[in-house]
Image (cartoon, rainbow, N blue to C red):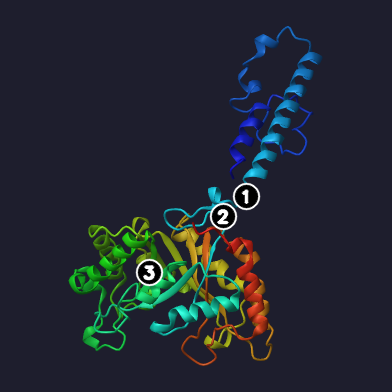
Amino acid sequence: MRFARPLRRITAALRGVRPGTGPPAGRPATGSPAGPGSPAGTGRHRSPKAGRPAASRRRVLITSAAVVCAALVAVLALRNTSEPSGTDGECRPTELLEPPCGAWFGAFVPHERADLEEKVKAYEEQVGRKLDIVYTYHDMSLHEGTRREGQLLSPEEQRVGEKRMLLLSWESKWWGGTKGQQPRWEEIAAGDLDATVIDVQAKRIKDYGQRTGKKVFLSFDLEMDTRTPANGTPAQYVQAYRHIHDRFRELGVDNVVWTWIITGYLNHGDLFKRMYPGDAYVDWIGYNQYNYYRCHKTEWLTFEQTQTATHEWIRENISADKPLMLSEFGSAADSARPERQAEWYARVPPVLKGLEGVKAALQWNYRDPGPHCDLAVANEAAWEALRKVAADPHLNQPTE
């Protein structure tokens, strides 16, 4: 879009070209010759030209148009040679880590806490590139001893984050804890976990930002539409989310990109509306849609079928302009047709480019609970297809 404004200004200057002569060669007509502000529409410049013969006026107009076009071509040629499209001047990430010229590529890579670096590097070797975003999960347990589940930005994550962005999913759970240890939205909203959990992790993220200058994507209770009523009401979720957001702000944590992630199942549409914290509290919106196939007894769905309806619904009902994230996407395999998963991934790039505002796509390379629910890349053909996805220019953007 760098050259759009000059082009429009020059076009406006040429709106007085006589009807029938058309726009200069190679440039589409824009606007009406007698539109507001144009010489023909306002009557300006008529007096100086009143005594000039028509043929002379035509020669002056044609000559002026030719000079302007030649100058424009020269400027564009110079700029295209010295500053090609996609340079960091155009495509540098925004303050909210949004890539203006394309989208980030990321993944959830199964791992144990201690081997995160090893597993990420192994995935990157398979897919043929460095990940832009690495996705990890944490609960809200107390940090005790060597336990890392409740420790946002573990040492391993910080090392992985040296050359990558991190998406931290923070869940109101205590994995392996007792029923009484499970955090509830009402308690979070009331500030009951501030001293023991919220403030502790806020300080860790703040220290990370001050030390490295880096921001993190942070999601609170992804797929919250599946957590009610067990964790509380939709209103209590919104209160809990806003409390965490506001508490971080009070503590001076300014290196968080707040990411709200839903399942994307449209029969939960009413819940999505009721559980949206509001534009002032959300920076990115994510949704998790898959081709589950036999996993949840569904039909085979293309990548387009899994994404488009949810994308359109979010744009119409939640936000028309927030950056969107395919926070988890992937496909089951078809044992009867081993090549089918590869064909599914091959269709990702053209569809992804048509999803307005989708600025990140994170592949899920693991399984879901239940039979036939292995959503990992199944074979070499599928890996090769995913490599082509990851190599697409749209998903290769400058990170600094």
Where is residue 274? Give x, y as percent. 35, 66
Label 1 is placed on what type of residue?
A: Ser
Please name whichever residue, 36 or 96, is drawn nearer the observer in this view of the structure. Answer: 96
The residue located at (61%, 40%) in the rendering is 4
Where is residue 171? Give x, y as percent. 33, 76
Q: Quadrant of residue 377?
A: bottom right
Label placed on residue 101: 2
Vertical arrangement, residue 252 with respect to residue 237, above or below: above
Q: Name the residue carrying label 3.
A: 219
State the SS at label 1.
Answer: loop
Label 3 is placed on what type of residue?
A: Ser
Please name whichever residue, 268 or 263, is drawn nearer the observer in this view of the structure. Answer: 263
Label 2 is placed on what type of residue?
A: Cys
Query: In the rendered structure, are the residues bearing label 1 and label 2 in contact, judged by CB atoms less than 8 Å apart?
Result: yes
The first of marks 1 and 3 along the sequence is 1
Question: In this rendering, which labeled residue sits more in front, label 1 or label 3?
Answer: 1
Where is residue 328? Give x, y as percent. 49, 74
Q: Quadrant of residue 345?
A: bottom right
Q: CA distance from mark 1 to mark 2?
A: 9 Å
Q: Quadrant of the N terminus?
A: top right
Label placed on residue 85: 1
Q: Quadrant of residue 343?
A: bottom right
